Image (cartoon, rainbow, N blue to C red):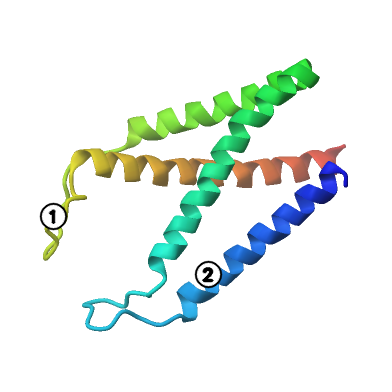
Amino acid sequence: MNSKRILNIVTIVLFLITVVILGLFMFGGEIPNQLYDTPIYTGALLNWAYVLFGIAIIAAIIFPIARLFTRPKQAMKSFIGLLAVIVVVVIAYAMADGTPMNIPGYNGPDNVPSMLILSDTIIFTMYILFIGAILAILGTEIYRRLK
């Protein structure tokens, strides 16, 4: 089997697992006696998100290193992309605010500056990457029309 076929199979399997876990989360029921609606499979969905995130991080680091030995010029482009993501995360970290929030009825351990900065960094990184993706799509379409 060639690598493209293996990659397609792995992608389909990951997608199917995601659909099943998302279905369990959406339709698997609620935890009884909770103040707010709390799906039973929230933990499974979060754990699967962590697994996918870990796979993405490993792929983002390993593939450029492997490509460094096979195609050095293309590897530099991969490292530039990885460096751009690091710059985006640093900018998002600089924008993050660690001021504890006043949340009535919440006394949990996550309303501390370190967790608030981490969550702000993740949210701002997603915003920046989303805006970048939209601008890239628009820029590509405009470039194609003008060419």
Per the image, the residue denoted by label 1 is 102
Separation of residues labelled 1 and 2 (CA atoms): 32 Å
Residue 131 seen by the camera: no
Residue 17 picture location, percent across and down: 60, 64
Mark 1 residue type:
Asn
Mark 2 residue type:
Leu
In the image, taking residue 18 as reference, residue 139 lies left or right, namely: right
Residue 16 picture location, percent across and down: 65, 66
The crowd level at tag 2 (other Cα within 10 Å; few <14, some 14-19, many 20+) is: some
Residue 81 picture location, percent across and down: 62, 28
Per the image, the residue denoted by label 2 is 22
Residue 43 picture location, percent across and down: 39, 63
Residue 100 seen by the camera: yes
Task: Look at 31% across and 79% down and name the residue there.
Answer: 31
Q: Secondary structure at mark 1?
A: loop
Q: Nearer the viewer, residue 90 or 145?
A: 90
Task: Look at 68% across and 30% down and name the residue there.
Answer: 63
Q: Nearer the viewer, residue 140 or 23?
A: 23
